[in-house]
Image (cartoon, grey):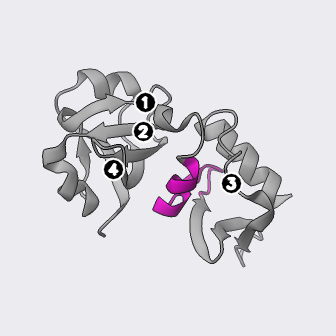
Amino acid sequence: MEKEKFAITLDYLFGKGSSNPFPLDRLEFEFSKRTGRVKRVLLDGKLLATFREDGSLALTLEGAKWLSKSENFLKNCVIVKKDVEDEIKKGKSVFAKHLTYVGERIRVNSEVIILNERREIIAVGRAKLSHNMMKYFKRGVAVKVREGLWG
C-alpha cells in the first residue's frame, strides 16, 4: 500500500513515469506515532523523501538523485549561473535573476531540483514563483532551498 502511494505521488508531482527509477520493492517506510500515516521514505537507510501534511513530498538530495533517472527530470529543475553555485550549495535561496533554465512543470510551492550549469544536482527546495514568473522576473526569490550539497 505505502509503495503504491509513494509511486502515485511521485508520478502526480513530477510527471507520469517519474517513479519508474525508484526500486519500490526495497523502500522502507517510517510512520508517524501520532497519526499512523507514512512520514518518511528510506532506501538502504538513506532518507529519500518526507510526506508533508498536505500529501505532497519533500525530496532530499538522495531522492533527487533517483528522480534524475526519470525522463521528466529536467521539467522539474532549475539551472543556476556558475557565480552563485557555491551559495546555493550552502543552502541560500535562489533568486530569479540567477536562473538560466526553468522547467515547464514548476508551479508555486512545487518541489524543485536545483542544478549547476554542468547539470549536477546541488540543492533541492520549494518554488516560490511559477515557471513563467521565474522566466520573466528579474527580482525576488524563485526557490527557497531546503537542502544544499554543503549544508
Q: Residue shown at 44%/44% (left/top)?
A: 112
**Circles 3, 4 touching at the beta carbon (< 8 Å):** no
Q: CA distance from mark 3 to mark 1?
A: 21 Å
Q: Which residue is mark 3?
A: 22
Which comes before the other along the chain, label 2 or label 4?
Answer: 2
Q: CA distance from mark 3 to mark 4?
A: 25 Å
Q: Secondary structure at mark 1?
A: loop
Identified by mark 4, the residue type is: Lys
Identified by mark 3, the residue type is: Phe
> Is residue 57 inside the magenta stretch?
yes
Of 52 and 146, the residue lying toward us: 146
Q: Which residue is mark 2?
A: 77
Identified by mark 1, the residue type is: Gly
Which comes before the other along the chain, label 3 or label 4?
Answer: 3
Q: Where on the picture, by quarter, is residue 32?
A: bottom right
Q: Secondary structure at mark 4?
A: strand
Q: CA distance from mark 1 to mark 4?
A: 16 Å
